[in-house]
Amino acid sequence: MKPEQTSDDSPNRSTIERFFSGLSEYIFQSKLGVADVQLIDYLSDMMLRFIRIDSLNRVRRSNGRPATELFQMLSEAEQRIGLAKRDVHRHIGDVTLFWSGMYPERLRRLRPERSPDGFLDYCKQGKRAYAIAAEIEGGANRPSSDLLHQLSSEFEMCAYGLREVRREWERGPSDGGPLVIS
């Protein structure tokens, strides 16, 4: 790596990765005063992962179909043990944080008569899921228990930051046009 080149400038990182990373750093550090690099990196990575719908729906039910609703994921988490349980609870935390932060209007439209998710409090379930995941040791290639505890305790702040990230990219650049990723 050249001296003037930072890891964020790595040619191996895609434009969309740099976009989410830069926008997350700007919002969390400059606007919210959160200078926790590990937390910010986790959140920008989460947004990047959830660009792909298969990442959002990666938890499978016993019949092999994706668990697309929160109540289904919660049921699956209770049937798992060890790292599998940790991974499903972490995923539940990520999904609830993503929807609570990026698209809260979708959650307001959930109706109990259409889905059992209409009865659930996404914030409460997300905080709980991260806390459960944090209690199960994850190993070197997984997020630390400390980070998962932090996501649980600072869930609302993270959701607010994600709403600000969305607002910023919808606002577009200062010239008034939409943000375009080339």
Image (tube, rainbow, N blue to C red):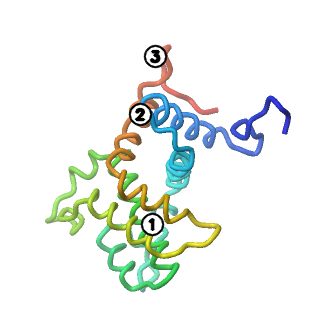
Residue indicated by mark 2: 32
Counting residues from the start of the chain, the first of labels 2 and 3 encountered is: 2
Mark 3, secondary structure of its residue: loop
Counting residues from the start of the chain, the first of labels 3 and 1 encountered is: 1
Q: Give residue 121's mark.
A: none
Residue drawn at the location 77% of the way across and 40% of the way down: 11
Counting residues from the start of the chain, the first of labels 1 and 2 encountered is: 2
Residue drawn at the location 34% of the way across and 61% of the way down: 126
Residue type, mark 3 in image: Gly
Residue indicated by mark 3: 176
Q: Could you say where residue 28 lies in the image, as x and y percent from the top left?
A: 46, 36
Residue drawn at the location 69% of the way across and 38% of the way down: 8
Q: Is residue 8 left or right of residue 170?
A: right
Whether tag 3 and tag 1 are in contact, CB under 8 A, the answer is no
Residue type, mark 1 in image: Arg
Above/below status of 107 relative to 6: below
Q: Give residue 90's mark.
A: 1
Residue drawn at the location 54% of the way across and 63% of the way down: 144
Mark 1, secondary structure of its residue: helix
**C-alpha gap between disc 1 and disc 2:** 24 Å
Quarter holding the N terminus? top right
**C-alpha gap between disc 2 and disc 3:** 23 Å
